[in-house]
Amino acid sequence: MREVHMGTYAVDKSPAVLSAAGLGSCIAVILFDANKKIGGLAHIMRPKYEGQTGELAKFADKVIPAMFEEMLKIGSNKDDVHAKIVGGANMFPDTAEFGGDVGVQNTVAAEEALKNLGVHITDKDTGGHVGKTVYFDLSTGLLDVRFKM
Amino acid sequence: MDIESLFKGLVLERLKENLERFFGFPVEVNIKNFKSEKLSEVVHIFGDPEEHNAVILMRVTGSIPGYLVAVFPVRAANSLVKHLLGQTAEAAGEWTDMERSAIKETSNLIAGSVLTVLSDALGKSLVASIPGMTLDMVLAAVDVALIDIAKATDTASILEMEFIDHEIRGYIFYLMDEGSYRKLARSIEEKNA
C-alpha cells in the first residue's frame, strides 16, 4: 500500500492500493483508468496556486493536470480516465473561527480542474463534518472510505 | 536561552502549576518533540491517523501567530469529565454541552498557561481564539491549521508537550509556520542580548 501524504500525489499501476489518511478540509482526488488499471491519488491541501514558492502538489489546479499527464505517459487513454473526490469537510461547524469554507473551495477547484481536462466524476463524497481515510485498490477500482460512525 | 529551553523551563513550570491547581492532584508535564517538519511528513507526529481523539483547536493571534491543539484520548477525556464534574460521561462522542465545556475549559487553561508565559518572557502579545472541538482523527482535525500554514510554506514547526496523570493524559501541539518560528527565535535572541 502506498500512503499518499498531505500535499503530495502518487501514480501507479495494478496491483497497488493508494491511500490518504485523515482527510478533513483536504481532499483526495482519485483518477482511474479502469481499462489499463492505472490510477493516481492526490492529497490536496489548497484550491489554487497563487505564485507561492514550494511544492505545487498541494494545489488542486496544479496537481490534477500533473497527475493526469503522468497517467497518460505510462499508458492511460485520456477518454478512459474517471475521477472520484473525497473530503472537503468543515471539521468545526460550531466555531466560526474554523468554520471557513476551504473544504468547499478545494472541492470546487478540483471539479473545475477535472472539467478543464474533460474528466468525468463518477463518485463524490465531499463536505460534512467528519474526517475520512480512503483506500483505493487499482486492481478492482474499489474505493473504501472510512470514517467515524 | 533558545525556544526549546524556554518551553522546557518557564512554560512547563507554569503549565504544571496551573494544571495541578485546576485538577487538585500532581501531574507530570514533558516536552515530547520539537521539530520543523515538511507538511508531507507531519502525519507521523499526530499518532495513529485513524484513531479518534477529542481534539481542541485554537488559533493564536498576535505577534507570533500559530495554532495550539490539545488532544485527549477518549478514555482520558472521559476521566477528565468525571474528575471535573463528578459524573461519568456518556459514550464517546455523546458528551453533553457541560462535558464538552469541561474539556474545552481545560484546553483554555493550557493555552492561557503557555501564551501568558511566552507573552511575559518575550514582551509580545499572544492571544488564543475560542476553542473549536471535535471527536475525530487528529490529522483530519488539524488539517485546517496545516492548510493555513501551507498558504506560504511547506514546513511547520511543531512543539509537542504532554501531561500525564495515572488516568488523565493530554497532548498539546504548538504549530507555527516558518515565519512565526523565525519571529519567536528572534524575540528570544533579543531578550538574551
Image: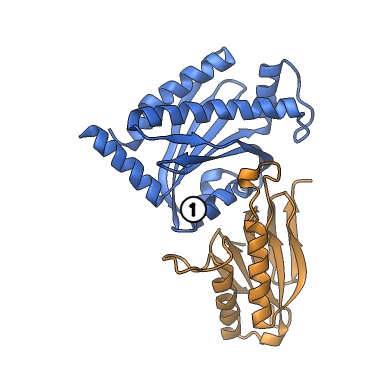
Asked where in the image residue B83 lies, by quadrant, the reply is top right
Direction from residue A82 to residue B26 in the image, left or right: left
Which chain does tag 1 point to?
B
Q: In this view, does B180 lie above or below B129?
A: below
Circle 1 Cα neighbour tier, 10 Å, few/some/many (<14 / 14–19 / ≥20): many
Name the outermost residue toward the top.
B24
Asked if one can make out residue A38 in the rendered structure from this viewpoint, the answer is no
Q: Residue at x 47, y 44 (%)?
A: B66
Residue A134 point in image, percent of width and height: 69, 59
Chain with colour orange in the figure: A
Which residue bears the numbered disc 1? B149
Direction from residue B68 to residue B100 in the image, left or right: right
Locate the N terminus of chain A by quadrant. bottom right
Give the camera-side residue of A77 and B56: B56
Chain with colour blue in the figure: B
Give the camera-side residue of A18 and B37: B37
Q: Residue at x 38, y 50 (%)?
A: B179
Residue B132 point in image, percent of width and height: 63, 39
Asked where in the image residue B168 lies, by quadrant, the reply is top right
SS for callout 1? helix
User: At label 1, which amino acid type do we have?
Assistant: Ile
Asked if one can make out residue A24 in the rendered structure from this viewpoint, the answer is yes
Residue A3 point in image, percent of width and height: 59, 60
Q: In this view, does A118 lie above or below B48?
A: below
